[in-house]
Image (cartoon, helix red, strand yellow):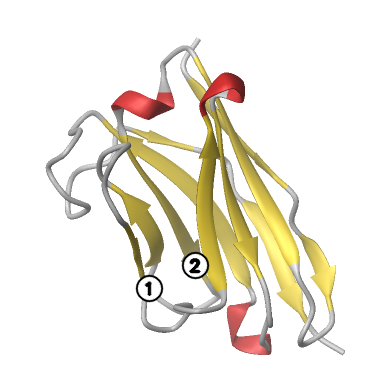
Amino acid sequence: QVQLVESGGGLVQPGGSLRLSCAASGFILDYYVVAWFRQAPGKERERVSCISSSDGPVYYADSVKGRFTMSGDNAKNTVYLQMNSLKPEDTAVYYCAAAAAYGLGCNVLYDYWGQGTQVTVSS
């Protein structure tokens, strides 16, 4: 069964850190374009980070550049999003997604989505 499962969300104070995980089953993440998205209430979904090929760069939204880091563990078929210096405006549901479009960039149609994990940044 093809599945993406996120975990690691929660409530954190401004300036704090969280690490989100996205575990894949039924397919190999390393062969896919993989991205993290987020959606806050009343706002459009925003792509936070993306990697198009395993040997390529990670792209970050300007809003998170320098604070968030996307990484992966092939042995665990899992990607991570390390989020540091969190701000209240980072509050959103975070989703990971994968596209069968390896190497074609990040502006692709994503085939698989996780269920999302809530991140709330508040004092």
- Tag 1 secondary structure: loop
Q: Position of residue 65 (x, y in %)?
A: 44, 78
> Which residue matches tag 1?
44
Q: Is residue 88 above or below residue 11?
A: below
Q: Is residue 57 above or below residue 123?
A: above
Instruction: Describe residue 96's horizontal placement relative to residue 101 as left or right.
Output: right
Q: What amino acid is labelled 2 in the image?
A: Gln
Which residue: 55% across, 75% down?
Answer: 41
Q: Position of residue 23 (x, y in %)?
A: 60, 30
Of all residues, the one furthest to the front in this rendering is: 55
Q: Position of residue 50 (x, y in %)?
A: 35, 54
Q: Is residue 63 above or below residue 102?
A: below
Residue 83, by quadrant, is bottom right
Q: If the image is split into quadrants, where does the C terminus sit?
A: bottom right
Q: What amino acid is labelled 1 in the image?
A: Glu
Which residue: 40% across, 61% down?
Answer: 49
| Pick the front one: 52 or 39 | 52
Question: Which comes sooner in the sequence, label 2 or label 1?
Answer: 2
Which residue: 51% across, 26% down?
Answer: 74
Instruction: Describe residue 14's horizontal placement relative to residue 62 as left or right.
Output: right
> Which residue matches tag 2?
39
Real-space Cα separation, disc 2 to disc 1, in angstroms: 6 Å
Check if mark 2's residue and mark 1's residue have beta carbons within 8 Å.
yes
- Tag 2 secondary structure: strand
